[in-house]
Amino acid sequence: MARTSAVAAVAVLVLLAGAGLYYVKSGPATQPAADEAANHPAPPPEAGPVQKDSKTVNELMNLAISHLEQGNLAEAEKDLQAARAHAPQQPLVAYNTAILRVKQHRPDDALRELEASFVAGFSYFDQLDMDNDLDPLRDNPRFVALVAKYRKPAPGK
């Protein structure tokens, strides 16, 4: 339960920080651009049903974590795939997919997902150290090497 809260809190922080950074970097919208957008509405969607209740990546991650805890791996897989479709470079999507792969007894795939998470910017190694879901990988030399490769040394060391 503590892992769920910690991962959910981290996911929210990462998403909020990313949104804030995007806003700061992009600056406020200019009025001419807003007027242009208002005068040219988006075309209607192509074929396919319109999703009326679009889920955010954060909502999908929370659903996936809940399904993982309940042992509903098929639903967790669907949620994580949907989250990845919305945010392919989100490190926590890959991290939680690694957790799913561990629960599916697919250690090689779990290690690939962990590395994808690290490459995408995962930096919550303190939480990773406490994550019991990763216990089946901890004695794996590839896991040890992977974590050592991407873990940043503490300041002053």
Image: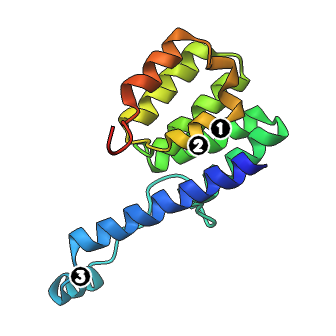
Q: Position of residue 48 (x, y in %)?
A: 54, 52
Q: Residue at x 63, y 65 (%)?
A: 53
- Please indicate whether residue 77 sits to the left or right of residue 111 in the image: right
Q: Which residue is mark 1?
A: 130
Q: Earlier in the sequence, mark 2 or mark 3?
A: 3
Q: Is residue 95 above or below residue 135?
A: below
Report if the CB atoms under discs 2 and 1 are less than 8 Å apart.
Answer: yes
- Amino acid at dot 2: Gln
Q: Residues within 10 Å of mark 2 (few under 14, many from 20)?
A: few
Cα separation between marks 2 and 3: 35 Å
Residue 127: numbered disc:
2
- Amino acid at dot 1: Met
Q: Position of residue 92 (x, y in %)?
A: 52, 44
Q: Residue at x 45, y 35 (%)?
A: 117
Residue 28: numbered disc:
3
Q: Position of residue 1 (x, y in %)?
A: 79, 49
Whether residue 49 appears in this view of the structure is no
Quadrant hosting residue 129: top right
Q: Nearer the viewer's eye, disc 2 or disc 3? A: 2
Q: Residues within 10 Å of mark 1 (few under 14, many from 20)?
A: few
Cα separation between marks 1 and 3: 40 Å
